[in-house]
Image (cartoon, grey):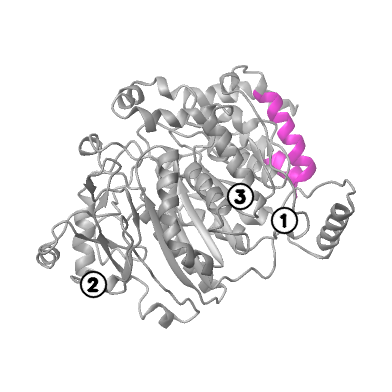
């Protein structure tokens, strides 16, 4: 480990990681033991924009992982990580992904180059309680769920194939016909052989505040590692042999500066990207617009093309900005005085007419025209990003799938979770929720220091759902290549301003569910029963039930 030359090629300003994993049905395909892996990571000093050297997150991280197992070492490292303070503004997790400290052995092996540091990342997915008494990282809670599942999409069969041929034939003849509303599940999924996973983190707190509020845990390395585990599990389930290469893009700053930096670094990996037949982006928060704008530029410059499957998992993305009015809260106002540009830029997405929002929408149109699929996943108790923003409800296209993560610790009422699930299902099938989700999103906001915004990227089902949508659904351009992206504009300042809007929106939702969803009638009756049995305990939820009292008469 002391000789950095063993890590292969490294480009200026980045760490590099290459991993090839053969996934098969036998356990031996995982190098003998797939319970643990120590990831050895080398940080190479880079130049900041002001010309100074830095080992901070302004790097392109790629880690080289060597499989080994040592329960004692893992236990000691986990105890050390558990002692670190996490940043409560973004996360309640006590699990720190990147350990910046070095041990004596690493220091002694690197005395010739003091600017090079060695880090170790430990995966604890299968760590049992008898091997370690420290808390495990936030994973899947026994009551946590992601709704709806990929099963909400209909299965492709003979009838749908005939409609596909009709749509394609009509479009070739110039005959105006109804466009397909949704994608279909396929029996035989596509099995990629070369996979490239790209992780892009969101907004990071300034370094001045990190000693006070703790280090952020939602790093690009974290996302790429979680995505790799999900891809590996999917490949094992489908008996596919794959090789995986992970690229973790990390840099602080505003959206445009990050896109420009990542674009220049990704050009160094053109050959590896073109060899891949599946490219998986995993982004969080501010990383969502960054990844979409970056991908649009990669496609326009020919670094990537539509000959391969490309998908973006956008977790708690800032598509319509944070909650309306949160910029007036004391904590945000005090924080913005320290780092104003990157923080306040997020609020530009609240107005769809700003240059940044227009660029974001234009980039969505660009990547979808190349057949890219997007999964927007939001947390139902997010304290920073409302559901209508995380799920990008102003953008309509069959290549977009929406799902909500419901944390088991959030104690979300069954009526609320089922309503949100129906809203997402209707959108995934090409219908409308009549604005219900936009009306109830302000009510669902979690506490400012809660973990709803960050727990979503610890949930394995979120990554697995994205892979299923990318690889187990039809491609729209197979039969209707020019379907446009529809943008629905709305003014946030008028959102939930009239308390009488919600009951009429709910009436429309019930009508759509009854008419278009399988077993729609029973779903509507179930919602009415849950509403009558619902006893809210907070002021906002009590107000929501008061506004929906008309449901008792089945309006």
Q: Where is residue 203 in the image (x, y as percent from the top left)?
A: 38, 39
Quadrant that contains the N terminus:
bottom left
Crowding around mark 1 (Cα neighbors within 10 Å: few <14, some 14 to 19, many 20+) is many
Q: Which of 268 and 439 is in front in this view?
A: 268
Of circles 1 and 3, the one toward us is 3
Q: Nearer the viewer, residue 350 or 25?
A: 350
Crowding around mark 2 (Cα neighbors within 10 Å: few <14, some 14 to 19, many 20+) is few
Which residue occupies 23% across, 72% down?
70
**Residue 136 in sight from this viewpoint:** yes
Q: Is mark 2 on a helix, strand or loop?
A: loop
Which callout, 1 or 2, points at the residue further toward the start of the chain? 2
Q: What element carries label 1?
A: helix
**Chief SS of the magenta region:** helix
Q: Where is residue 297 in the image (x, y as percent from the top left)?
A: 53, 49
Magenta stretch contains residue 210? no
**Which mark is on residue 367?**
3
Magenta stretch contains residue 517? yes
Of circles 1 and 2, the one toward us is 1
Q: Label 1, label 3: how many angstroms apart (C-alpha)?
A: 13 Å
Which callout, 1 or 3, points at the residue further toward the start of the chain? 3
Q: What element carries label 3?
A: helix
First to last magenta residue range: 502-526
Which residue occupies 32% across, 71% down?
8
Q: Label 1, label 2: how many angstroms apart (C-alpha)?
A: 47 Å
Label 1: which residue?
A: 476
Asked if labels 3 and 2 touch by Cβ distance under 8 angstroms, the answer is no
Label 2: which residue?
A: 70
């Amino acid at each position: 480990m002391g000789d950095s030359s063993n890590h292969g090629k490294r480009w200026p300003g980045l760490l590099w990681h290459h991993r090839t994993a053969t996934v098969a049905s036998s356990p031996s395909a995982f190098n003998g033991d797939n319970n643990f892996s120590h990831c050895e990571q080398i940080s190479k000093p880079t130049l900041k924009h002001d010309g100074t050297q830095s080992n901070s997150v302004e790097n392109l991280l790629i880690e080289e992982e060597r499989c080994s197992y040592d329960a004692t070492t893992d236990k000691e490292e986990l105890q050390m990580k558990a002692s670190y303070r996490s940043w409560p503004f973004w996360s309640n997790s006590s699990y720190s992904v990147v350990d910046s400290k070095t041990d004596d052995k690493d220091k002694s092996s690197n005395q010739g180059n003091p600017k090079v540091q060695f880090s170790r990342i430990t995966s604890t997915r299968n760590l049992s309680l008898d091997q370690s008494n420290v808390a495990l990282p936030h994973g899947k809670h026994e009551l946590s769920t992601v709704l709806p599942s990929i099963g909400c999409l209909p299965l492709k069969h003979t009838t749908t194939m005939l409609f596909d041929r009709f749509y394609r034939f009509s479009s070739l003849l110039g005959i105006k016909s109804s466009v397909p509303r949704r994608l279909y599940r396929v029996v035989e999924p596509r099995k990629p052989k070369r996979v490239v996973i790209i992780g892009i983190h969101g907004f990071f707190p300034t370094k001045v505040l990190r000693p006070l509020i703790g280090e952020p845990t939602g790093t690009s390395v974290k996302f790429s590692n979680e995505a790799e585990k999900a891809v590996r599990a999917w490949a094992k389930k489908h008996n596919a042999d794959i090789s995986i290469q992970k690229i973790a893009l990390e840099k602080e700053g505003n959206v445009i500066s990050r896109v420009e930096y990542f674009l220049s670094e990704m050009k160094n990996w053109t050959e590896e990207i073109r060899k891949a037949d599946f490219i998986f982006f995993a982004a969080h928060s501010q990383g969502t617009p960054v990844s979409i704008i970056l991908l649009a530029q990669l496609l326009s410059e020919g670094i990537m093309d539509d000959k391969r499957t490309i998908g973006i998992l956008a977790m708690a993305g800032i598509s319509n900005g944070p909650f309306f009015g949160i910029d007036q809260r004391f904590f945000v106002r005090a924080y913005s005085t320290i780092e104003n540009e990157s923080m306040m830029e997020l609020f530009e997405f609240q107005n769809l007419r700003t240059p940044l929002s227009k660029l974001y929408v234009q980039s969505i149109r660009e990547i979808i025209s190349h057949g890219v699929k997007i999964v927007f996943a939001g947390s139902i108790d997010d304290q920073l990003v409302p559901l209508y923003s995380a799920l990008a409800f102003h953008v309509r296209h069959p290549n977009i799938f929406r799902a909500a993560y419901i944390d088991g610790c959030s104690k979300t009422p069954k009526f609320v979770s089922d309503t949100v699930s129906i809203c997402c299902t209707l959108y995934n099938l090409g219908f409308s929720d009549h604005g219900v989700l936009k009306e109830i999103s302000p009510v669902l906001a979690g506490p400012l220091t809660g973990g709803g915004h960050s727990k979503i990227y610890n949930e394995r089902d979120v990554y697995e759902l994205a892979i299923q949508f990318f690889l187990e659904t039809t491609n729209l351009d197979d039969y209707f290549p020019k379907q446009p992206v529809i943008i629905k504009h709305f003014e946030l300042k008028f959102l939930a301003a009239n308390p009488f809007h919600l009951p009429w929106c709910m009436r429309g939702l019930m009508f759509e569910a009854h008419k278009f969803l399988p077993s729609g009638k029973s779903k509507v009756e179930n919602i009415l029963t849950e509403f009558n049995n619902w006893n809210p305990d907070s002021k906002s939820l009590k107000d929501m039930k008061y506004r929906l009292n008309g449901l008792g008469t089945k309006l």
